[in-house]
Amino acid sequence: MKAFLTTLLASITLSSPVLAQPLPADHRALVDSLIEDGVGYYVNTPNDVCFNPKTPNLNGAYITTSDGNRFLVVCQDLREDETQTVWTPNDLDTIRHEAIHAIQDCLDGDKTDGEMVPLFSTYEEVIDAYGVENSMAVISNYLDSYADRQADIQLEVEAFYGAENYSGGEVNTWYNTYCR
C-alpha cells in the first residue's frame, strides 16, 4: 500500500501543470523600469522568436524596430507553449543580459535607434573581468553570425559578463542611470 501511494503521489506531481512563480523582487523592479520606460516585455512570445525551429535554443532577445519600438523577450527554459512557467536561474540571467543590451542602446543618447555602444570602458576590461576562456566561448559562438559586425561581439561579451556577475538590482540601477 505504501508503494502504491508513493507511486500515485509521484504520478500526480509529474502530471500536474507547473505554476508560474513571480519574478524575484530585484528582477521585477528591473522589468518594471523597462516597461515604464516604454520597452515591451514578453515571456515565451512571439512564437517566431521563442518557438522558431531555426533557433531552438534561443534564450531571449532585445529588439529595436525601425519605428523606434523596443522589446525585451524572454524564452523560458521550461516553456512548452506561451504560458509563463517557473523561472530558472538562466531565465533570470536572460532578463539581465537583454536589459544590458537595452542599456547599451541608451548610451549613444538615442534609446530607440538600435545603435549600441559598450557599457564598460574597454573591451580589455571586460575580457579581464569575465576571463579569457569565458570571453572566447562567447566570441566563438557569435563569430559566424556577427562576421560583418565585429563590434557587436564586444557587446555580447559585455552582456554575458554583466548578466553573470551583477544582480537584477544592479542592472536596474544602471538602466535608471543611463536610460531614464
Image (cartoon, rainbow, N blue to C red):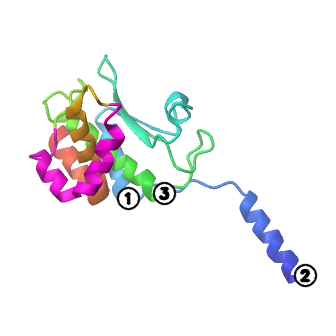
Neighbour class for label 2 at 10 Å: few (<14), some, many (≥20)? few
Q: Which mark is residue 88?
A: 3
Q: Is residue 173 visible?
A: yes
Considering the image in quadrants, where does the C terminus appear?
top left
Q: Foreground residue, 23 or 13?
A: 13
If you read the primary sequence from the N terminus, does the residue marked by circle 1 or circle 2 appear first?
2
Q: Describe the element under mark 2 as helix, strand or loop.
A: loop
Q: Which residue is mark 2?
A: 1
Please identify, in this view, whether the residue under mark 1 or under mark 2 is nearer the observer.
Answer: 2
Q: Which residues are magenta?
A: 118-145
Which mark's residue is nearer the viewer, 1 or 3?
3
Tell me which residue sits at (31%, 40%) in the image: 34
Q: Residue at x 18, y 52 (%)?
A: 127
**Image quadrant occupied by the N terminus:** bottom right
Kindly indicate the quadrant of the structure image that contains residue 147.
top left
Look at mark 1 in the image and give the residue it sits on.
25
Q: Measuring 21% from the left and 27% from the top, which residue is drawn there?
A: 115
- The residues tagged by marks 1 and 3 sit, at their Cα atoms, a distance apart of 15 Å
